[in-house]
Image (tube, coloured by chain):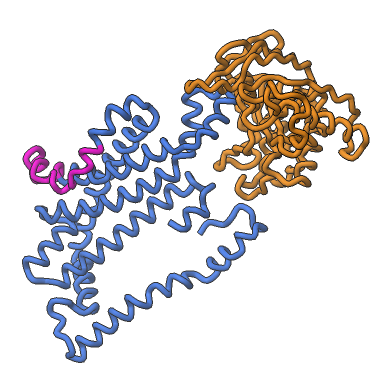
Amino acid sequence: MEASPHPGLAVAAPRARAAGLPGGRALLGLVLPLALALGWEAAVRAGLAQGRLVPPPSRVLGTLWGLAATGELWVHVTASLVRVATGFGFGALAGIAVGALTGTLPLARRLLDPSLQALRAIPSIAWVPLFILWFGIFETSKVTLIAVGVFFPVYLGVAGAIASVDRKLVEVGRVFRLTRPALARRILLPAVLPAAVVALRTGLGLGFMFVAAAELLGASEGLGYLLLDGQQLGKPDQIVAAIIAFAVLGKLCDAVLVALTRPLARWQDTARETL
Amino acid sequence: MLVLDRLSKTYADGTRALADIALTVRAAEIVALIGGSGCGKTTLLRLIAGLDRASAGRISLDGEAIAGPHPGVGIVFQEPRLLPWLSVAGNVAFGLSALAREERRARVAHALERVGLAEHAGRWPRELSGGQQQRVAIARAFVAAPKVLLLDEPFSALDAFTRAGLHRHLLALWEESRPTVLLVTHDVAEAVALADRVVVLRPKPGRIDDTIPLALSRPRQPTSPGSEAAARQVLASLDRSLRPDDAPAGARPDATALWW
C-alpha cells in the first residue's frame, strides 16, 4: 500500500491502520479454502472418501513439488509465460493504437469500429482452425490467438476512455492554447490512463484464458499441456497442480502489471484500491 | 480596451442566443453582466474566450481581433475545472509551460499566497473544498497575467460566507495587475460588491438592456447606504428587463421577487 502524500489527511488514518496489521483482513479470506482443504485431507485420511478423482491437498502439493524439483514445472511455466507475454504484447499494442485512433478521429471510428465490433462478436476460439491452417500448429498460431483475445478488451477500454474524456477539461487546454499534440499529452493521456490500465488488466486475464485454450488444443509443453496430459493419463493431482500454477502465475502477472502502472495513476490511488 | 462590436450568436438549431451586443470595456474596469437565465451571459463569455465563434460582429482587444483563444484573455469557469492528476501547484502552473522553471515557481507560489492556499500547494485537487478549488482556478487564470479576465458565475455554487471571502481574494489579485474583468453573475449583491459598472441583459435573444455605473469606493460594505441604493437600482433595472417588450410599465409589480 502506498503512503498518502499527506499524512495529516483524515482518510489516511484508516488506511495506515490496515497497513499496520500485515494481511490482517486478507487472512480472513483464507479461512474458507483452508478449512475445505484440511477437511478433505482429513476425510481421505480417515477413509471416508477415496480421493482418487479429487486428490487430497497433500498429494496435489506432492505432485507440484515433484514437478518443481525435476525442473519440469519451470519448463511448462516458461513456455506458457512466453506465449502470454508475446501475445499480450502484440494484442495490447494493437488495441492501444487502434483504440487511440478511433477514439480521437471520428472518421476512423466510423470506418473501423463497425467491422471491429462485428469481429468481436466471434468467439475467439472459433479462429483456431483458421489460425492453424494459416500459421501452423506451433507458436505463431497460439500467440495470434492470445493476441486476438487481448486486443478486444484493450481496444474497447482505450477507445471508450478517450471518448468519455471530460470536454470541460479539454476546454481548459484550449483556453491555454495548447497545440493538438500538447493537448493529447497533457490532457487526454493522463485522463485516459486509469481506464487504460483497467483495460490492460482485463486483457491480461483473457491472455491467460487463451493460453490455456491454445495449449489444450495441441502443445508439447506449457501448463495447458500439463492439464491435458493429466487428463489423458488419469492424473487428477497433476491437473489440479497445473490449475494452481495457472492461478499463482496469473495473480503474479496482474500484480506486476499493477505495480508497473501504479505511478501512472497515482492521483487516483483511492479509487484503484477498490479494484 | 475590450470592444464588442454588434456581436450576435445564433446556434445551429436556430436559437438566437445573442443579438447586437455592443460594449466597450476600459482597461482595468470591472464590469458585471447580470440577467435572468437564458439571456446568453455564458455564451457571451465563451465568444470572448474564443471557445465559440460569433455568427456576426467582432471582438477586439486593444485593436487586435479575437477569433480564437487569445493569450491576453483568461477565464474562470463556473466549475473549478482543475486537472485531477496535477497537484494544486501543478494546476496553477498549467498555462505557464513556456516560462523558465524558476520564474514559473515564483509566480505560482505568489499566486497561491494571494489566494491563501500556499500551504496546500502539494495537495491533490480532490482534497480541497469547493471554495478552495475555485480559488485555485482563479489563481490559475491570474498567474498567466491576462489583460482581460472573464469570470462565469464562479461563485454561484458556494455559500454566502465563502463567497464574500472569495470576493476579497479576487480583488486582492486584481489590485496587483489590474486586468479588465468581465464578471457574469445572477447575484445583485455580488455585482454591487465588485463592479464599476453593471450591464443588465435582456433575454430571448440576449441583448443589452441597461447600463448602471456604480460610483462606489473600495473596499465596499454591503450594508452601506451607497451599496444598498445601488442594489435597489440594479434590481429595478433587472425587473424591467424581464418584462415582455410590449408590457406597460408597472404591469407586474411583484416581478422583483421573480426575476431569476
The C terminus of chain A is located in which quarter?
Answer: bottom left
**Where is A210 relative to A232, above or below?**
above
Q: Which region shows up in magenta?
A: A117-141
**Where is A144 relative to B146, above or below?**
below
Q: Indicate left or right for A175 with A36 as reference.
A: right
For this orientation, the residue located farthest to the right is: B225
Q: Indicate left or right for A275 with A11 as reference.
A: left
Question: Which color has been applied to chain B in this rendered view?
Answer: orange
Which residue does the image show at 64% across and 47% down from the upper left? B123
Q: Quadrant of residue A40?
A: bottom left
- In this orientation, does residue B102 appear? no
Q: Indicate left or right for A210 with B6 as reference.
A: left
Which residue does the image show at 63% across and 10% down from the upper left? B65
**Where is A142 relative to A232, above or below?**
above
Q: Indicate left or right for A105 with B195 as reference.
A: left
Residue B165 spot, x, y in % from top left: 79, 42
Supply the letter of whichever chain is blue.
A
Q: Quadrant of residue B2?
A: top right
Residue B194 spot, x, y in % from top left: 81, 31
Q: Is residue A240 magenta?
A: no
